[in-house]
Image (cartoon, helix red, strand yellow):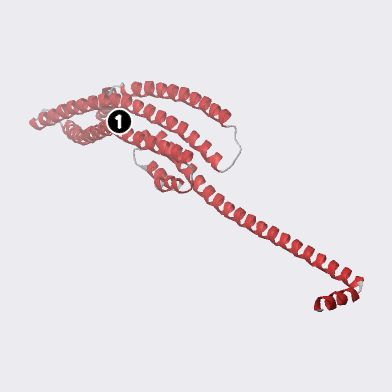
Amino acid sequence: MLLESAYRLLQSVPAIFYAITTGSTITLAGLYMQNRSESERNTERLRHDALMRDREREMTLRREVYLACAEALAHAQEYLAAFARDADGQYEALVKGIGADLNKVHIVGSLATVQAIVSANEFFVRSVADLSLARLPVKKLREEIKAEEQFVERASVRRDEALACMRDMDRAGTANSAFWAVQNQVLVETQAAIEAAAERVRVCKADLAVQESALLRQSAKAGMAFGALVVKANVAIRHELELPLDADAYLDLMARSQEVLARHVDQFHARALVKREEAAKRSPRQGFVRWLAGVRHDETKAAKV
């Protein structure tokens, strides 16, 4: 009875009401689906934006680290190339703090990049150790030359004093006194000591020219060999920073450049060695003979006057 009443009630409802209700339900369902889809798109867009911001921060950090690393490697190469000329330690400032710049790559770099940096750093450390050992004979010869030159300077003062005394006695007419003989002996002995020291300086300078030339060549070759490792590190860094590069063409270009530089280095050091050997072979006695001849000429003119 109840079911029949409900059925009759439904039959009494106009059809338009069902149409309106069904249309509203479909519209609400469509709006729900549209809002849900839009919400998912917004969520995906926000997630993508967050990922892009994170990637940009990461790339910014990598750029800073890699640029500092590339600069440190360039300074290390310059330091190796100038190692033989760094007598006063002025080039050591170039490599101050490069360890920190290279170690930062271990934090943000891929394994390939880290391996390239580690290989370059290992070669740099070995080269500095080898060049330091090779520079010891050079430093020793320079110290010996400096000591001999200081001796010559002191002996020259004594010689000049003896000459001055002999000049005064000659003017006073007491050139035949015993004091004249003493001063003459001082002159002869100091001049002999000066010439012996000057000869030792000449020999040391000749040896120094050979040692410095070998050290210069070793230093230059170490710098160029290190440069080849720097090139590989630069390729790895560019790959990390997603900078397009034809790696094969770049490596070939740098290899040809290294060959040209190696030829220029060999030619330069060959010419430098010849010039240094020629300068070292000049006799120091010739200068003294001309100087002493000039002194005696002046004394003769003064006596005539």
The residue depicted at 35 percent of the width and 42 percent of the height is: 89
Q: Under tag 1, what secondary structure?
A: helix
**Mark 1 — residue?**
134
Q: Nearer the viewer, residue 1 or 156?
A: 1
User: Against 88, is 295 above or below?
Assistant: above
Q: Nearer the viewer, residue 37 or 30?
A: 30
Residue 78 visible in the displayed image: no
Residue 268 visible in the displayed image: yes
The location of residue 220, given as percent across then percent down, is: 41, 30
Residue 119's image quarter?
A: top left
Amino acid type, label 1: Ala
The location of residue 270, given as percent across then percent down, is: 40, 21
Residue 189's image quarter?
A: top left
Count all numbered tags in the image, as a single digit.
Answer: 1
The residue depicted at 38 percent of the width and 22 percent of the height is: 275
The location of residue 2, given as percent across then percent down, is: 81, 79
Is 221 positioned to the left or the right of 209 in the image? Answer: right
The location of residue 244, given as percent across then percent down, is: 61, 38
